Amino acid sequence: MTYVNDRFYEELVTSFTNWQRPELEVTDVATRDECRRLLEREARLLDEGRYEDWLALYAEECVVWVPAAERPGDPRREVTVFFDDRRRLQDRIFRLRTGKAWSQVPPSRTARLVSNIEVFRAAGKLMVRSNLLLNEFRAGETRALAAWCAHRLAGGKIDAKQVNLLERDQSLRNPSILL
Amino acid sequence: MSTSIFFEHLVQEDRVHRSIYTDPLIFELEMTHIFGGVWCYLAHESQLPRPDDYLTAQLGLRPVIVVRDSGGKLRALFNRCTHRGARVCRETRGNAGTFQCPYHGWTYFNSGKLRGVPWPEGYACDFSDGKYNLAQVPRVESYRGFIFGTLNADMLPLADYLGAARRPIDEWLDRHPGGRVVLAEANRLKFKGNWKLAYDNAADGYHVLFSHRSLLETENRHAADPTKGMSFYLGKPDEAPMYVQYFGRGHHFKDKRPNIERRPGALWEIEGAQPGMAAYEQLIRQNLGARAPRALDLAASEPVNINIFPNLSILGNHIQVFQPLAVDETESVWYATAIVDEANELDGMADAVNAIRMRTQESFPNFGEVDDAANFEEIQKGLAACEDEWVYMHRGLGIPGRVKQLPDGTLKAPATDEVFMREHMKEWQRLMTTRPNIQLTR
């Protein structure tokens, strides 16, 4: 699994820059509904802990990118909250499944709300902007994480997702769940 | 009861009292005796490269602006308007020659000196009196890029305070081109527990196999014979060549380097799989040939924990900072570091090294620290059992020959020994019973 290389980063950064332009917006109702259903399905599979089914929504060559900088830059030059290719997403799932990932024993209960969906088409791919409100209950406490997300779709699969947490450059408490 | 008898009771040879983690009054004293009374890490010079660069931070609970003033001098100003007390700077970082309080408009130079107030004719006082300048930390010193501050006028110079810990810090820096690193954003966590829980953990080789079980299993999930990451803790870690060392003044060191063969590339070989490794490794090998293994080692995590009491831990490639927020809440910030290669020692491959190094540095905060933080929170919850008073840290105590005193006075013990914890607790006790000479300058 060697698809993360310099060109991959280059294209990713370019593709996630300046894409929310009015002339690129998709107004077709059927396409927008398809995107909305995909995002809602993703939220449900994560809330239900069905991680393998969730990962099946992603293209073989995929990335989940959660920037840590106030103004996200190039992930080659700065750390992120996480930047996971398929293998590291599989690692994340494997770790949660060991039963010894103490930050998730017992696991968080989550309810994700996905809203404010807008769809754009750039460089032949659909780019979906949404707002995420993630409610998490664990260890006697409920908290909320909010983010705006960008899903890049190709062939009906998610091939890149960026999650821009409101607190990305601040303390995230104990970020141990899949985003 | 005098405070020294009080604290003598709380720190014993083999155990400490739960209240040192739970009592708000003890925490309040710590904010003067420890976070103020000794050198505390404030910032890294790479965050303030130019004159007028600043960032906001905390010295204990005190809000400060760490600034390279217009003349190039490093200062830590209290971020507190002399007039009515509002924080004058609300940004996390920036570049400014002056700070104007948004409440009534008092304005200060970044040296801390009052520049002016609105409608001064309404005042009878002389504003050139230094008492109207911003308060500032009287002593700010830097050691090879690490900026520290103390309010204690009697504190020994920073280099002496670091003492024997300077050697591993030097070694950690000198493995990089130009002997330096720059910060490259951070993974920031927070836990509902006392700050000392994180510091007690910083050289703890005993918890690794248990607290980090999921990480060890994940790193080695494809291998029949586990060799990746911290697999050298498997089996009998006390018989491995790694060791823990106590330097004095609360500083300690866990050195895992002896577990790894001393040859270029050996560190790289045990690094767990991370995004982009294969492609960049190929690129680096193509460009550097026989020199590639040394470059690849720079992308791998350096197996040391260098802990500077009370709030700094240099570990892997991270600069970790412990920030107390309350008696039962602590922030744990893992600043990533990148290499800079001004002399082009790596033939243009520094960017490729950093592209891997950013991903390797995301691994531990995501797959390791989260589980420690969960355990710290569970300690804080467990300590609510107020009749069950003691916390034990006596692993290794009383076993003849286990802890060795070296000629330089430092103590060396097997990797899972808790001697470092007992020793920093003695230092903590000494500091809590000694009144520091706290001064402010203006």
Image (cartoon, helix red, strand yellow):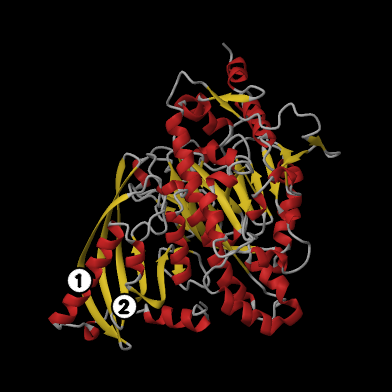
- Tell me the residue at 52%/71% (across/down): B275
Q: Is residue B170 left or right of residue B104?
A: right
Residue B134: x percent and y percent? 49, 44
- Are the two marked residues, 1 and 2, in contact with CB atoms closer than 8 angstroms? no
Q: Is residue B232 visible?
A: yes
Q: Is residue B132 visible?
A: no
Per the image, label 2 sits on a secondary structure element best described as strand
Residue marked by disc 1: A37
Q: Label 1 neighbourhood size at 10 Å, few (<14), some (14-19), many (20+)?
A: few
Residue at (28, 57) in percent of width and height: A47
Residue A67 screen position, x and y as percent? 42, 65
Residue B79: numbered disc: none
Q: Earlier in the sequence, mark 1 or mark 2?
A: 1
The three-letter amino acid code for the residue at tag 2 is: Lys
Q: Nearer the viewer, residue B405 or B54?
A: B405
User: Which chain is disc 1 placed on?
Assistant: A
